[in-house]
Amino acid sequence: MLDNENDLESLGPLKVLRVKGDPDAPTVVLFHGYGASAFDLYPIHEVLVTDQKFNWVFPHGHLSVPLMPGYSGRAWFPIDMAALEEAIRKNDFRNFADKDPEGMDVARQAAYLMLDAIGVPWNQLILGGFSQGAMLATDLTLRKEELSKGLMILSGALVNESLWKELAPKKSVLRFFQSHGEFDPILGYANAKKLEKLLRNSGLLGEFIAFNGGHEIPAPVIQGVSRYLNSLS
């Protein structure tokens, strides 16, 4: 099992875990969530049932964030943990929809350079992620002039709403996959549904899986990702 940074390779400005599959198959790029790492989502590719042997890239967040004494994780942009804990305590889910999260611009620049370094056409890239990684993947997909092959939003949220609403209709032929826990204590379910509505109102087609759970990737989502990737083959 891969579990340390010696297993990572440089791809542009970022470190990544890279799994090579069929050279003619698309490349799936999955961005992890806050406090995790490239290793967090890596096991997903081992449990999916797909017709093609996809190529995989698991980027490692450029920010180091403390989790507890002696332990740290990675992130794409900062989160005010005290505010988050207070929101969870009050059951008052934060809504990022009215702004571009602080630090997203730096993550976006690094991610685009990393994606260019992969060396495959943009229309052969399937971007996705979990939590703040899903926000980043959605932002990258909508802002890029070229059309990507797919978008997977796992427990993500709507941010920068006015810009996304402007850009999304330009991607109306893109099919997306989205999942969210109905009792997610970190990123509220209502915000995820708001994102789904924005995408559908912009002409995009996709599947939304709601599950009886929290901030996680349960078996029904893994099955849904498998179906989605097979539909793109």
Image: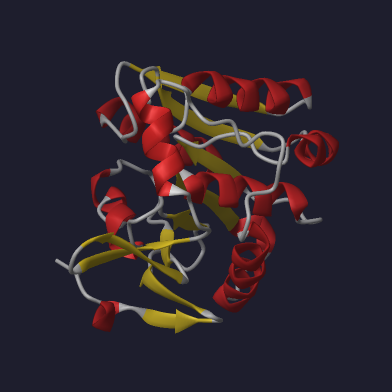
Which x, y percent locates residue 162? 81, 35
Would residue 181 be found to the left or right of residue 161 on screen?
left
In the depicted view, which residue is nearer to us: 44 or 107?
Answer: 107
User: Residue 126: percent from the left, percent from the top?
Assistant: 55, 51
Q: Can residue 90 be seen in this view?
A: yes
Q: Out of 211 and 230, give the one closest to the viewer.
A: 211
Q: From the viewer's perspective, tell me whether residue 104 is left or right of residue 142.
A: left
* Rendered position, 157 above or below 43: above
State the scheme by which the image is colored: secondary structure
Visible in this render: residue 226?
Answer: no
Q: Residue at x 64, y 67 (%)?
A: 106
| Residue 140 image offset from top left, x and y in percent | 66, 54
Among the 4 quarters of the image, the one containing residue 195: top right
Apparent side of residue 191 relative to residue 199 in the rendered image (left or right):
left
Quadrant of res 135 = top right
Quadrant of the snapshot with the N terminus: bottom left
Count the marks.
0
Seen in the picture, residue 204 relative to 67 is either above or below; the reply is above
Q: Residue at x 59, y 44 (%)?
A: 150
Q: Residue at 76% of width from left, 20% of height from top? A: 201
Res. 35 image quadrant:
bottom left
Question: Is 115 placed above or below 184 here?
Answer: below
Where residue 182 sits in the image (x, y, percent)? 39, 17
Image vertical order of residue 53 relative to residue 225, above or below? below
In the picture as drawn, the residue positioned furthest to the left comes out as 1
